[in-house]
Amino acid sequence: MRERRKPRTAKKDRDFLRKRSRHLEEVTDIGVQDYDLLRKFVTEHGKIIPARLTGATAKQQRQIKRGVRRARVMGLIP
């Protein structure tokens, strides 16, 4: 008889292994004034990088989104 394969681990078991962003470790508030920080979360074409790639929390991603959009209007970033 064949040996059975091990069951795959559930996705929620792997979620705790996701690394958090090193760019945001000591940052408490993300605003338009931090356009150097905001550039790290924008691609060369101007798209905002998703949180699943950056490791930002949901709250941090909302702050990044708001900051990037405001910085675009002000002309600080593309």
Image: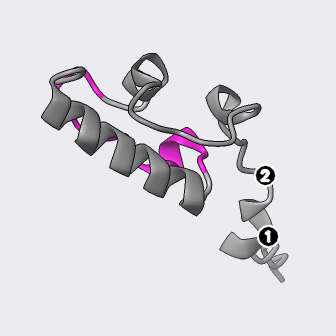
Circle 2 packing at 10 Å, graded few (<14), some (14-19), many (20+), is: few
Residue positioned 57% across, 60% down in the render? 59
Point out residue 22 in the picture as x, y percentages from the top left corner. 69, 28
Kindly identify the amino acid type of the residue bearing the numbered disc 2: Leu
Query: Does 55 appear in magenta?
Result: yes
Q: Horizontally, is 15 left or right of 23 in the view?
A: right
**Nearer the observer, 63 or 5:** 63
Residue of label 2: 17
Point out residue 53 in the picture as x, y percentages from the top left corner. 50, 43
From the viewer's perspective, is residue 76 above or below residue 54? Answer: above
Report the quarter where the C terminus lies: top left
Q: Horizontally, is 48 left or right of 6 in the view?
A: left
From the viewer's perspective, is residue 52 above or below residue 37? Answer: below
From the viewer's perspective, is residue 67 above or below residue 10? Answer: above
Point out residue 65 in the picture as x, y percentages from the top left corner. 36, 49
Distance, label 1 to label 2, CA atoms, is: 8 Å
Q: Horizontally, is 10 left or right of 55 in the view?
A: right
Query: Does 48 appear in magenta?
Result: yes
Label 1: which secondary element: helix
Label 2: which secondary element: loop
Residue positioned 47% across, 50% down in the render? 63
Query: Quick check: can you spot residue 37?
Result: yes
Point out residue 9 in the picture as x, y percentages from the top left corner. 76, 71
Residue at the top extreme of this rendering: 36
> Residue 13: which disc?
1
Identify the magenta region.
43-56
Report the quarter where the N terminus lies: bottom right
**Nearer the observer, 16 or 61:** 61
Kindly identify the amino acid type of the residue bearing the numbered disc 1: Asp
What's the magenta bit mostly, secondary-structure-wise? loop
